[in-house]
Image (spheres, rainbow, N blue to C red):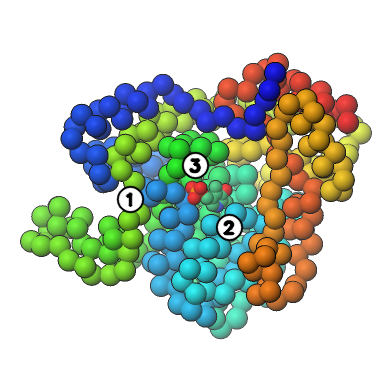
Amino acid sequence: MKIPFNKPFLTGKETFYINDAVNSGKISGNGKYTKLCHSFFEKKYEFKKCFLTTSCTDALEMAAILLDIQPGDEVILPSFTFVSTANAFVLRGAKLVFADSSNQNPNIDASKIESLITKNTKVIVVVHYAGMACEMDEIMDIANQYNLFVVEDAAQAIDSFYKGKPLGSIGHLGAFSFHETKNITSGEGGMLTINDEKFIERAEIIWEKGTNRSAFFRGEINKYNWVDIGSSFLPSEVVSAFLYAQLECLDDLQKKRKKIWSKYFEAFNLNQNKTFELPYIPHYATNNAHMFYVNFKTVKERDELIQILKKNQILAVFHYIPLHSSPFYFNKHDRRILANCDRFSDCLVRLPLYNDLKKKEQSKIINIVNEL
Ligand SMILES: *Cc1c(COP(=O)(O)O)cnc(C)c1O
């Protein structure tokens, strides 16, 4: 019995909606299914406006363009994240200033942000790791005090909340991922959320290659033109139709994922002989069961577990190699030590978590971990 790390969840209706999109004759972007997805998200999560994109990477790139990042601007972000969080801003010439993770979970340590602010700081980017909220009140207060923008990398954070507010609806902008490793998927896909109205009009232009084509199609202008920079950020209707099928099942899917997550948590919580820490969920955060990880005391113990699981044909994985020690950014980083980030990178391991994970399979994983 081979247990993969992830299996994308399919509702069974994806090809039905794709067929409908294909048969309608409109398969480029911003058609019926793109609009259905937009209104689903805007209604359910109170985003002022959202734009489906071809990936979360693209949504972050749109965010960096919208915030008018210029060479020399500084962006404060966690080092413990995926490269896309950083690349979007580096592409516009920004300098990255990495903040350490908190002691209790891999999220940015809000109390470390203020000391990193200089006259060049323009944006704070937070990453809601494992779909668990960062300390947003504290971060928004700092941003307001210093006139900074906040971008939420909510790639992992669909259907998760901070003090009752949906993640991705708190910062000026938010970015979600529908990559096949995330809770809901269109294979590759993403979404930019806009919570500050002043960005909406320009976002639509950037989304449409820097043209005012959307306004043209609405009949607001009689010809469309090149009016700004932009790119091809919008997905085709084929992708949006796929995603729409997933949205219909979002609540059921979340229930199932949370059940699997809780089974891991309860099984390991019973184990008194603690060789590892369990995920820490702050009182202000919900858990959307995006991932289940445990955090060992040493890299040796962590790697040992991965090896034992591998011998049993179970794939567990770790991440991230910190961006501040990456081959690309190491020499540009200011040499500050980010101890919590390094510890999570060395000691954290993610266990298989997907909708089709069978009870028997999960029990096998739990037994192996508990015997360790
Ligand atoms: C998955 C992920 C991304 C990238 O998402 P894509 O849709 O694959 O571009 C960015 N940031 C974080 C934190 C992620 O987990």
Dot 2 amino acid type: Val
In the rendered structure, find residue 83 and report the number of the disc placed on it: 2
Say which quarter of the image contains residue 182.
top right
Report which residue position mark 1 lands on.
234
Q: Check if mark 2's residue and mark 1's residue have beta carbons within 8 Å.
A: no
Report which residue position mark 3 lands on.
179
Q: CA distance from mark 2 to mark 3?
A: 15 Å
Which structural element holds mark 2? Answer: helix
Q: Is mark 2 within 8 Å of ligand 1?
A: yes
In the displayed structure, 275 sits above or below 95; it is: above
Question: Residue at point 60% right, 81% down?
Answer: 118
Task: Name the residue furthest right.
Answer: 273
Structural crowding at the residue carrying mark 1, measured as other residues with C-alpha within 10 Å and reported as few (<14), some (14–19) or many (≥20): many
Residue 140 in sight in this render: no
Look at the image and tell me in which quarter the C terminus lies. Answer: top right
Question: Residue at point 37% right, 33% down?
Answer: 242
Say which quarter of the image contains residue 77.
bottom right
Q: Check if mark 2's residue and mark 3's residue have beta carbons within 8 Å.
A: no
Residue 318 x, y percent position in the rendering: 71, 44
Q: CA distance from mark 2 to mark 1?
A: 21 Å
Dot 1 amino acid type: Leu
Which badge, 2 or 1, is on the more N-terminal residue? Answer: 2
Which structural element holds mark 3? Answer: loop
